[in-house]
Image: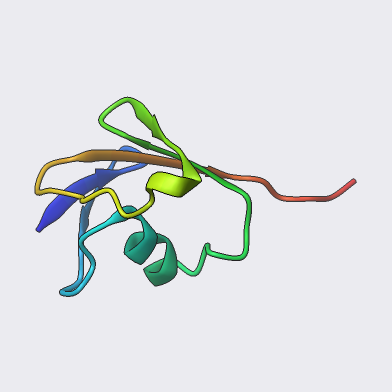
Amino acid sequence: MHITLNGNRYELPKGVSNVQQLLEHLELTERIVIVEVNKEIVQKDDYDRPIRDRDEVEMIHFVGGG
């Protein structure tokens, strides 16, 4: 299954079929992340939302520094 992730074509590995699994795969579960699927923001309580072939996913995570 292929999605667009932050503007780039990305092939999802087998077993990754929702937002939570994608965050786990990308090792972003310990970060504050804003997730948007098909131009709709996904709330943390809805991370079980399925990801389908050709979905457009945008993720923004914050990096500290100074």
Residue 45: x, y in percent? Answer: 45, 47
Residue that sits furthest to the top in the current view: 39
Residue depicted at 71% across the width and 50% down the height: 63
Q: Quadrant of residue 54?
A: top left
Q: Quadrant of residue 36?
A: top left
Residue 64: x, y in percent? Answer: 79, 50
Total number of numbered discs in the rendering: 0
Residue that sits furthest to the front in the current view: 45
Residue depicted at 66% across the width and 46% down the height: 62
Q: Quadrant of residue 24?
A: bottom left
Q: Above or below — where is 62 with respect to 14?
A: above
Residue depicted at 34% across the width and 61% down the height: 22
Residue depicted at 52% across the width and 62% down the height: 28
Q: Quadrant of the N terminus?
A: bottom left
Given residues 9 and 34, the one toward you in this image is 34
Given residues 34 and 8, the one toward you in this image is 34
